[in-house]
Amino acid sequence: MTAPIEITVRDLTACEETIEWVKAQAKRLVDFSEHATWCRVVVEQPHRRHRKGRRYRVTVDLAVPGEVVVGTGDDAAASHEDLETAVSDAFGSVRRQLRERHRVRGWHRPHVIVAQAEPSPAPA
């Protein structure tokens, strides 16, 4: 079962390719954590009046049992001039937090155990 993914774009016009790329990133994140129950991504351009370039902010919320993991980049008010960098930083932040939670809680993916052949007896 895959978790539902919700993508919201605010205050900017994003092309279909960008939205599909964000969906692919969200799908990879949900597949990374088999415990995820839902994922929400918000892509926005918070300030229209600026002195230098456009600034983008991306927030990723991923629900796992008992909590919601939130990633926005390097700091709480992270905004970037490049949309791809903003998306990559937000998803990277959530991935790092998930790795730490997996390590602390012992959530591991099931490993395939390969049966080893019995060694043949030495000729007598």
Image (spheres, rainbow, N blue to C red):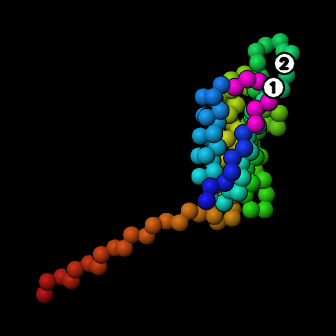
* Residue at 71%, 48% in the rendered image: 39
* Residue at 83%, 12% in the rendered image: 51
- Kindly identify which residue carries mark 1: 11
**Position of residue 110 measured from the top left corner of the image (x, y, whole percent):** 53, 66
- When the figure is inspected, residue 99 is found, relative to residue 55, above or below; the finding is below
Q: Secondary structure at mark 1?
A: loop
- When the figure is inspected, residue 24 is found, relative to residue 97, above or below; the finding is above
Q: Secondary structure at mark 2?
A: loop
Quarter of the image with the N terminus is bottom right
Let me know if residue 31 is in the magenta part.
no
Task: Bin the neighbour count of mark 2 within 10 Å (Cα to Cα): few under 14, some 14-19, many 20 and up.
Answer: few
User: Marks 1 and 2: which is nearer the front?
Assistant: 1
- When the figure is inspected, residue 53 is found, relative to residue 77, above or below; the finding is above
**In the image as oriented, which residue stretches furthest toward the top?**
51
- Kindly identify which residue carries mark 2: 48
> How many marks can you see?
2
